[in-house]
Image (cartoon, grey):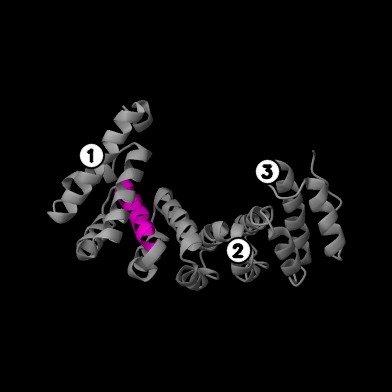
Amino acid sequence: MGFYDLSKNERLQLVDTINRDVLAGIQGSKSGGIVSYFSDEDTYIRKTAYQATGKIWKRSPDLQPKILTLLDTLLTSDNEKLRQTAINAAGEIGTGEFERVAHFFDRGLFDEHPSVRNAVIGSIKKMGEKNPPPVLKWVKKYLHHPDKEIRREICHGIELRGRTHPQDILPLLKELQFDKTARVKNTLVHVLGQIAYKKGCLATAVKHLKHWENKELVLQALDEIVDVHHRYKNFAELTQEEAINYIDKHYRNKRSGKRPTR
């Protein structure tokens, strides 16, 4: 039975059990129960377990060495779910102490399994939102990596910080403007669209894009920004028409003639 097949009270009881079992496993250096939760088929059980690990890290500094040893061991497992959940647990820690867990992401970026690499992206998103200076410094190491998937994952990973502080990530995104790989370019355009519809973000994005040299990519990004204001109209600060008018007024080069369907 899955996590959300349970009643609310049963879910609360299960969360309490997982929290206690994870703590007991860390305290006693017995990882059997933790392994069971970290490798569970149910996403929400794994999530509860790695969030429990993050909470224990923050409130019990004396257990931090044991937690790192445990996660380092799980990261070498043949089971991709264990590696994935270890990365996610490291992401919980990295929201406050990124330097202690940076090596997990150095390794996870190159994992053979996509679920582990996706855990790196998700962790970069949450860490970059809450603890940006060291995370964005780390990101710079990989912006021009020879592997196109690494560049794409890094580009995607910094998106969430950009939704509230686009000025922090636009200089990093700019370094990818001439990337020749379609998957990287498409992700870059996607991220530019995602960081431009929240309050105050469109003006920052447009102002920055004026100084990009790849005008063809900028036009694609502006069209994506306009389209996002329609797709996310219930969450955007401006209407699509307001976004179009702002771009036409403040971006001096002509955008492409494409107008998204309303």
Q: Quadrant of the N terminus?
A: top left
Q: Main secondary structure of the magenta part?
A: helix
Q: Quadrant of the C terminus?
A: top right
Please tell me which residue lies in front, 77 or 6. Answer: 6
Position of 36 relative to 223 (above/below) = above
Residue drawn where x is 27% and y is 34% of the image: 13
Segment tinted magenta in the rendering: 80-94
Q: Say which residue label 2 marks.
A: 165
Position of 108 relative to 42 (above/below) = below
Q: Say which residue label 3 marks.
A: 232
Inspect the image, locate mark 1, and give the three-letter code of the amino acid beneath it.
Thr
Left or right relative to 125: residue 97: left
Q: Position of residue 188 (x, y in %)?
A: 63, 59
Cα gap from disc 2 to disc 3, whole angstroms? 19 Å
Q: Say which residue label 1 marks.
A: 17
> Callout 2: few (<14), some (14-19), or many (20+) C-alpha neighbours within 10 Å?
some
Inspect the image, locate mark 3, and give the three-letter code of the amino acid beneath it.
Tyr
Residue drawn where x is 63% and y is 63% of the image: 166
